[in-house]
């Protein structure tokens, strides 16, 4: 009996050793930055090293600030960022936490990625998947190719997400139905990829460019200094004055210099005066106090012509005023009678 138990124990140990030896590897580490751990199917935890093989059902956990890159045996590459947790199966992986960037050139075998509520089926393509444990929200952003996204509880309701678009599954939004694929900008795409610190060359060289007409070659405008005023000289007339209207008013509106050299007669109480120079309107003479004496003839000759005319007019007015009676004859007679009393 003792011999039988010994043989049975030896067979069990041999079977366990055989299973350990023939455990199926599904991936291999190609690059590590920082500290990364691996948990084997038996529950053993150890630090992951470059070129180490990952067995089926093993889990890879990335420390904060670290990154790791692994290749499976179906032409797919997996990049993990800090705080990510990924479990490997044969032809599929399960993202339990964090973010992974998958690049697949496989065209022979269908591959899959799952989270707690999302399922992503892919062949040849490139996409980024994020899973947040706090909100149970899954997001899939496609860089190249296309993938099929669905809820793990209803795989019949799925969307094909093409390159440059993303979809998400949130239990609080539409009962967990995948969101309709939405376009994403290049800046958002580069921001998502920058977390992995290894951008493809084709994405690095791509810059956003404004759309223009294909037949027109556009040149970059010259830089303009801030605060600088630019004057543009042109002979172009506004639309409201150009054409026939402009020609019409140009003929009507002309500037002529009026010079009348004809003698202008100026009559001052019977005295005729002719002036042969071009007519100039007389300026108003400044008012003088009453105590100012009359101007002598010699002084009058030196005075301007306008002042002489005003002097002659004043003397003539005084003379005629003295000759005319202030009152009528009847009124003067009445005044004299009153004075005699």
Image: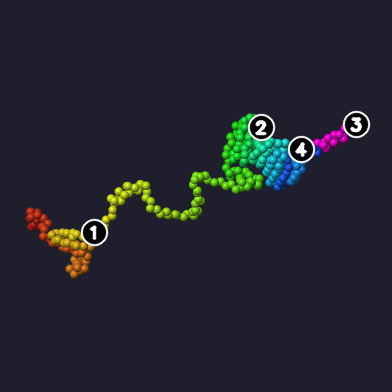
Could you tell me residue 154's position as x and y percent? 64, 30
The answer to whether residue 190 shows anywhere in this view is: yes
Label whose residue precedes the other's in the sequence (3 or 2): 3
Q: Between disc 1 and disc 2, whose residue precedes? A: 2
Look at the image and say whether residue 2 sits in the magenta stretch. Answer: yes
Residue at mark 4: 24
Asked if the residue under mark 4 is in contact with the one under mark 1, i.e. CB atoms within 8 Å, the reply is no
Q: How many marks?
A: 4
> Can residue 341 be seen by looking at this rendering?
no
Side of 303 where 144 appears, left or right: right
Indicate the position of residue 300 as horizontal and vertical percent values.
19, 67
Report the residue at 34% width, 47% height from top: 243
Image location (x, y in percent) of residue 84: 69, 41
Colour style of the rendered protein structure: rainbow
Q: Nearer the viewer, residue 180 or 35?
A: 180
Please rate how many residues cluster around mark 3, counting C-alpha atoms within 10 Å: few if below 14, some from 14 to 19, many from 20.
few
Dot 1 surroundings within 10 Å: few (below 14), some, or many (20 or more)?
Answer: few
In the image, the segment drawn in magenta is 1-19
Residue 140, position in %: x, y?
Answer: 63, 38
Residue for badge 3:
4
């Amino acid at each position: 009996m003792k011999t039988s138990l010994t043989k049975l124990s030896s067979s069990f140990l041999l079977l366990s050793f055989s299973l350990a030896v023939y455990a199926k590897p599904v991936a291999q580490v190609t690059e590590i930055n920082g500290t990364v751990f691996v948990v084997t199917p038996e529950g053993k935890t150890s630090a992951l090293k470059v070129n180490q093989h990952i067995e089926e059902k093993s889990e890879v956990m990335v420390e904060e600030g670290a990154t790791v890159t692994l290749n499976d045996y179906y032409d797919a590459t997996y990049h993990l960022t800090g705080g990510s947790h990924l479990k490997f199966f044969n032809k599929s992986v399960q993202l339990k936490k964090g973010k992974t960037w998958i690049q697949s050139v496989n065209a022979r075998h269908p591959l899959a990625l799952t989270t707690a509520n999302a399922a992503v089926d892919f062949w040849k393509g490139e996409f980024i998947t994020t899973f947040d444990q706090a909100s149970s929200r899954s997001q899939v952003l496609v860089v190249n190719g296309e993938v099929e996204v669905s809820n793990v509880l209803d795989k019949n309701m799925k969307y094909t997400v093409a390159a440059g678009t993303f979809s998400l599954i949130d239990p609080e939004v539409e009962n967990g139905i995948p969101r309709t694929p939405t376009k994403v900008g290049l800046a958002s795409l580069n921001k998502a990829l920058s977390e992995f610190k290894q951008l493809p060359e084709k994405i690095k060289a791509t810059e956003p460019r404004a759309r223009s007409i294909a037949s027109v070659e556009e040149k970059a405008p010259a830089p303009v200094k801030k605060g600088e005023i630019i004057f543009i000289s042109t002979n172009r007339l506004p639309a409201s004055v150009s054409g026939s209207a402009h020609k019409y008013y140009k003929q009507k509106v002309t500037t002529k210099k009026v010079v009348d050299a004809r003698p202008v007669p100026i009559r001052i109480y019977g005295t005729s005066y002719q002036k042969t120079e071009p007519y100039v309107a007389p300026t108003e003479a400044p008012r003088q106090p009453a105590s100012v004496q009359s101007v002598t003839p010699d002084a009058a000759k030196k005075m301007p012509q306008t002042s002489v005319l005003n002097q002659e007019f004043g003397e003539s007015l005084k003379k005629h005023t003295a000759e005319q009676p202030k009152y009528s004859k009847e009124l003067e007679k009445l005044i004299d009678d009153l004075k005699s009393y």
